[in-house]
Amino acid sequence: MSRELLYAQALNEALDIALQSDPDVILMGEDIAGGGGREDQGIEEAWGGILGITKGLYTKYGASRVRDTPISEMGFLGTAVGAAVTGLRPVVELMFMDFIGVSLDPLLNQASKLRYMFGGKARVPLTVRTSMGAGLRAAAQHSQTLYGMTTAIPGLKTVCPATPGDAKGMLLAAIRDDDPVVFCEPKSLIFSSGEVAEGDYEIPLGKANILREGSDVTLVGVGRTVQVALDAAAQMESDGTSAEVLDLRSLQPLDEDSILASLSKTGRLVVIDEAPPRCGIASDVASLCVDRGFDYLNAPVKKVTAPYTPVPYSPTLEDAFMPNAARVMEAVSSLG
């Protein structure tokens, strides 16, 4: 049985299930409780974080499991790594992925390395939830797509669901994983809706998903750009072009086999990524297809990405900054 939920509601439901099913799961972050517990001032409900995703959980599980933190990302991410190593399963809300710069050391040099350095005897079951991406007029310091940074760190897993149903199942899988997972939530999708199954279920990390079958070209997207790919595919259908749409879902581990299998069927590939073009996911997928799928290619791999510039604040410029269906269709047309 499934029903329509917002992306934010699906995340909240996953957190509720995780807290209920495992007493070792705790939540940490800035303002995830907020005013909660201030009954003396008539405030009983938690704020639920910057986008309200943890709303209601403080009231249900209390201050020992839904913990407000100081405005110190380095401090609470370091604390979460220690908590994970000693047996808890912390879920940390890093308000915006743009703030990863002030908290990178616990992820880069601790969480990602401990299992390796201790010969597999240490576990770091840490989940870092973080909002990312443009589209909400939040300007250059709050709109970046930085999942390429964490994908590049051996020992970290990085995922980015594109639908509410995937968000719920992948968040539960991330929380129950014994390795650290960076869970990226595109801000432009937080209030989008979709079908979400009831109850407790997991979607395995590292498995891409074909959302639309096609035979002429493969469109690869992640997060927000999955819908861009679907929109382009629908428009191209009227012109007789059959586009297959592949949602990566997981960036590390990356489902290389599904990418290559789709390429082998269509012979053409366009990768759509909201991050800038240098050293990004689009380049990584393009490199994979040239290295391991060269014999399948009937045309060069094309990338549709954001420009190599900070995210502009101007609404008109921000809209132009983000990949769209028209640019995808133009890239497909150039393949011949």
Image (tube, rainbow, N blue to C red):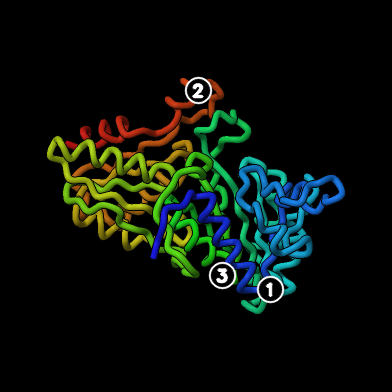
Circle 3: residue type = Asp
Of 44 and 289, the residue lying toward us: 44
Kindly indicate the quadrant of the structure image that contains residue 174.
Answer: bottom right
For the question of whether residue 294 can be seen, the reply is: no
Vertical order, 292 against 217 (above or below) = below
Of 16 and 189, the residue lying toward us: 16
User: For the residue carrying disc 1, how many other residues have a C-alpha within 10 Å: few (<14), some (14-19), or many (20+)?
Assistant: few
> Of discs 1 and 2, which sits in the foreground?
1
Q: Circle 1 is placed at which residue position?
A: 23
The residue positioned 54% from the left and 29% from the top of the image is 311
> Of discs 1 and 3, which sits in the foreground?
1
Q: Position of residue 173 (x, y in %)?
A: 52, 67
Q: Is residue 271 left or right of residue 77?
A: left
Vertical order, 48 against 112 (above or below) = above
Q: Circle 3 is placed at which residue position?
A: 177
Q: Position of residue 181 (x, y in %)?
A: 57, 60
Q: Circle 2 is placed at which residue position?
A: 315
> Of discs 3 and 2, which sits in the foreground?
2
Sequence-wise first label, 1 or 3: 1
Q: Is residue 177 left or right of residue 28?
A: left
The residue positioned 78% from the left and 45% from the top of the image is 71
- In terms of secondary structure, where does tag 2 sit? helix
Kindly indicate the quadrant of the structure image that contains residue 320.
Answer: top left
Circle 1: residue type = Pro
Q: CA distance from mark 3 to mark 2?
A: 39 Å
Residue, far front: 42
The residue positioned 42% from the left and 63% from the top of the image is 197
